[in-house]
Amino acid sequence: MLATTASRFTGLAERRPRGITWVMVVSTVLLGVLAGLPSLWPTSFPMLHGVMVDTDPENMLAGDEPVRIFHNAMKRAFSLHDMVVVGIVNDEHPDGVFNPESLQRVFALTQFARTLQWPDPDHPDRRIGVVEADMLAPSMVDTIEQAGLGAVSFSWLMPEPPETRDEALAVRDAARALPMLDGTLVSEDGRALALYLPLTHKDLSYRVRSALLEHTADWAGTGDEVHITGLPVAEDTFGVQMFYQMAISAPLAMLVIFLVMWWFFRHLTLVTSPMVVAMVSAMGTMGLLVVTGNTIHIMSSMIPVFIMPIAVLDAVHILSEFFDRYPHTRDRVRTIRDVVATLFAPMLFTTLTTMAGFASLALTPIPPVQVFGVFVAVGVFLAWLWTMLFIPAFILMMPEEKLAGFGHASSNAGEAETPLSRGLRALGRGVAARAKPVLGVTAVVVAVAIYGIGTININDNPVKWFEPAHPIRVADRVLNTHFGGTYMAYLTLRPAADADAGLEAYREGFRERLRQRQAGLVADGLPEAGPVFDALAALADAAAAAADDKAGFLASLGAVTADRLDGAPDDRYFAWDEAQVFLDAERQRDEIFKAPEVLRYIDALETVLSETGVVGKSNSLADLVKTVHRELLLGAPEEFRIPDSPEAVAQTLLTFQNSHRPYDLWHLVTPDYRSAALWVQLTSGDNEDMARVVDAVNAFTAANPPPRGLETAWFGLTYINVIWQEKMVAGMLAALLGSFGVVLVLMAVLFRSPLWGALCMIPLTVTIGLIYGIIGLIGKDYDMPIAVLSALSLGLAVDYAIHFLSRTRATVAAVGAWSTAVGPVFDEPARAITRNAVVLGVGFLPLLAAPLVPYQTVGVFIAAILFTAGVGTLLILPALVTVLQRWLFRTPSGADQPAGTVPSAMTPDHGKGV
Amino acid sequence: MIRSAFAKPAAAATAAFAVAVAAMVLAAGPGRAADPGVADIVHRTNLVSYFQGKDGRARVSMTITDDQGRARARQFTILRRDEADTDSLRGDAYRGEQKYYVYFHRPADVSKMVLMVWKHLTRDDDRWLYLPALDLVKRIAATDKRTSFAGSDFFYEDVSGRSIDLDRHELVSTTDTYYLIRNTPKDPGAVEFGHYDMYVHKATFLPIQTEYFDRQGRKYRVYRVLRVEQIQGYNTVVEASMEDLRTGSKTVLAYDRVAYDSDLPDNIFSERFLRRAPTRHLR
């Protein structure tokens, strides 16, 4: 069946070479146009999808992922924005940046940053950019301090740039005295300061950063250094650099592959055909990606670089086959027919395994990885299709004279004497002779690999996606040394959904408190409270009968009481007013974050956080209350505490709200005082560090359950990264197992034998195990690119085994015994495998030129995997075949040949030119 | 009794207003900064906004609503006593020192809290805060009056009045109903605004809408009179809002139980009465 399909392909290429070319060109151009038009003129083509760039690592998780929904809900509840952190450091001046000249510059920079807003393209009446009201800068925050004569003062920390050294140092000291600012605005060493610029949209951070850098360009030579960091900056900058990567790596990969092919075949015209296939496959795939409304993300930006080397492989097979055969016949049509018939099945199967490897990424729960896997699989299919159709058509369209001199009739002899050929033959003889030692060594390697895998450290950090010398990495290091940390995570405390007791249970306490208040008021000289509170108790009984819950009860009772107050005789007015105050206090009992015991619990949590060693600083409602309380009480250090009653807390907070920025409170607690957020500043964005902080909090809350049925939950970018990493690790295991299963089944079908199928899987299993073992042993973190590589490399690495085993089987069938087949197998097929590894390895190397670490990692590791798989195939498989030959070659030769024409695919000349 | 919506400066004007305006325009002419007409308008506005009667009191319901619609309510009584016993504009006689006593009723946990201000003409105000839960009377430095009043979008200066001596005033334009007065600070470093525009209602001299602009000329804060009543012969703003366009927060003040000239004794505006509220005047 495969044979007929193969001949249909060639027949089509023979009859309609130009038609095929046209279809290929037109379909690719059409995709390009469909993708290009809406990108260039989005408004003219609203029905089409244009290029959408997505640089947001948050999108590593689907939009409806609970952690993201919670993150966005909490950001809104606490009016939080993602922030750009601008650090100003001066190592030359003895006072650091706290000198009049530097502070003058900081002041000007702040004024400039306040203006960084632009019209919102989606809502022309709104503006996007820096959220001015929430900026943190010396000239924009309040200080609370003693102002003589027992007065307390709320005033701007630095309303104007200071003119003297003393004034400059006073700014520093005032900020350092406030826990909310110390370590956040002013560094703990008192030498640096940081501005925090919240953004309406975090994808403006590159724009904001660029504007700030431009503004501070003339600071050179002043001693002041500007460092800009924060996760949004890293993420957004990454997106911008991603395009440089695509602009550098993809063309570079093209060039490198072209040069290697030219060196192999030394025929410019012919070599252009695989390049055309590679281009068409990559462009067609990217076109499809855009047209189907998918985004260009960190993962999908790598698609062209993956497709191009893989796309060329099949074409290389055809060309090298043609290269060998054509000189013998000098008949293009016949040669092409033979070549395609020979190669159709192995190319189909290697294509299928490669596609399976990539498509298995669809099993991960990470949308960008799914998109990447599926579309590379699509691209690999396109490459196969156009290789089978266009390469023959291209050869048939070439003028006959251009083929003159192509290929070498005598190449066989020449090839046989190269050092590579001699080495490979020696290798084959050696392995066959020492099969057991080779397998022994393999077993040791596997054992080491398993140990290494056990030591793998799962960790990632988007800031480390930049090279160590990148300004963002430098800023990250400098600022996290000086300050409490630039990585933000937030810990929320909220009551559990079922924390409220029923109305009946509540009313018991209500009655009790009502009597207490009544007695208290009477004792305080308000005797009218006696009858009035009795009346209130009676009204409460009536209201409770009609109410469903506490809120309804208090609302209806409040309404009745208000009527009584309005109609109260003069002597009862104040008592009824007290009754209303009492009811309002009952309502306020739900305002849990005014309760001293709750604030003290927050305080204890912060101590736990600070003991993790990763949290440089945390800010909370408790810190705010303690600070204001201290300043109200003459700044006495012992008054830096939570006051003893909810009323005292409320009055402390109302005092704070007489400042310039009363709304700062709502970043720490919601206006209903039902949810609070702790701002946790981490000095490291490593997921493992965030995970450690989460564990520490969980351990504490388990040992010390929060009061009032409160529950903790995390949000913030640093935390989200941990979640997607956890999903990725689990998802990649699923992908790896899925891809392994699919490839194993394909191999069993191809060889019509589960044993041969299993044998086929061994080299790549050892390879992947080894590579990941090495990753564990050298301490390289298991991060996103590393994770993605495992599943997809499986589909690529199996190709060598397919070639090796099918060829082995055919040769044994021809010559009768494995011992005599070793020689031929380690001739051309071994050379083909070696050269194949070279093309693939070299094809991925341009990723090393990318300025971003994940791409470099992918380049290095995929090259390592493919190289190791090649070597592993040539070492392990012959050893295994030697040991297992009794079972492998049990049946008479030829009786269970693989499907189609696989054995004949590996004719003695196959792969020679590769 | 005037009872009309003043939500927009473009509110309708009567024919009588038009005649009055014509006379005004002829006399003053729009846009001349040093025009005595401007000073006159500004003084009349100052008087009706902050100095009517020799004293005043009101029960105020304050509702602060943030950009997400989350509302917080506070209730307080505000007492004011003027040093000057006259409302005469002649020789600025109406202007003098003032004392304010703000007593919080709700929410319950801040009830009995008191804020007292002695407003001086030539030096910084004196400000006290009484926190009953801490049993603490505290002086609050008042060098900067442009801080939030009790967590709302109103500033201290909006509640007790910004001294007209601090700004340069300019009549930008005159419509059938309004004078548009532009106020520019004499000391730009002391305030957060670049200038503010007042739409002064011609008949009542109430500033019906005030818009604050930052130094880049962007409008960021808007005051609006929502309801006016005539009480004891005084045109009185009984509902007003302040909106912060940057945070999206908005505060509405509704004045109830407004009374003028109720002979508030001077001694209740003292530290002694912070701890022991003059309940008779707070009903």
Image (tube, coloured by chain):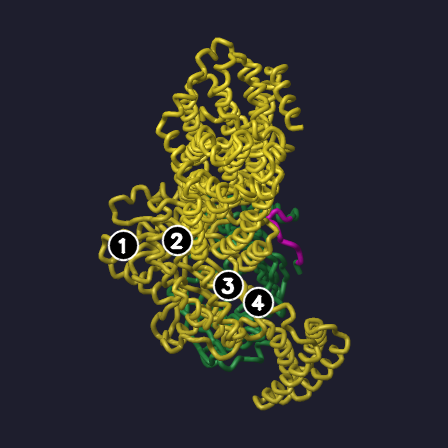
Q: Which mark is residue A612?
A: none
As drawn, is A892 to the left or to the right of A884?
Answer: right
First-in-chain label (1 vs 3): 1
Label 2 to label 4: alpha-carbon separation: 43 Å
- Residue nearest the viewer, comparing B248 with A23: A23
User: Do the residues at pointers 1 and 3 share their chain?
Assistant: yes
- Residue nearest the viewer, comparing A730 with B50: A730
Identify the chain drawn in yellow. A
Q: Tag 1, which chain?
A: A
Q: Which mark is residue A100?
A: 1
- Residue nearest the viewer, comparing A91 with A832: A832
Instruction: Report x, y in % for residue B7.
Output: 62, 52
Q: Tag 4, which chain?
A: A
Q: Which mark is residue A494?
A: 4
- Residue nearest the viewer, comparing B268 with B195: B195
Nearest to viewer (mark 1 / mark 4): 4
Nearest to viewer (mark 2 / mark 3): 2
The residue that disc 3 covers is A491
Write down the region rendered in magenta.
B3-11
The secondary structure type at the circle numbered 1 is helix
Amino acid carrying mark 3 in the image: Leu
Instruction: Report x, y in % for residue B74.
Output: 58, 68
Q: Considering the image in quadrants, where does the N terminus of chain B appear? A: bottom right
Amino acid carrying mark 4 in the image: Arg
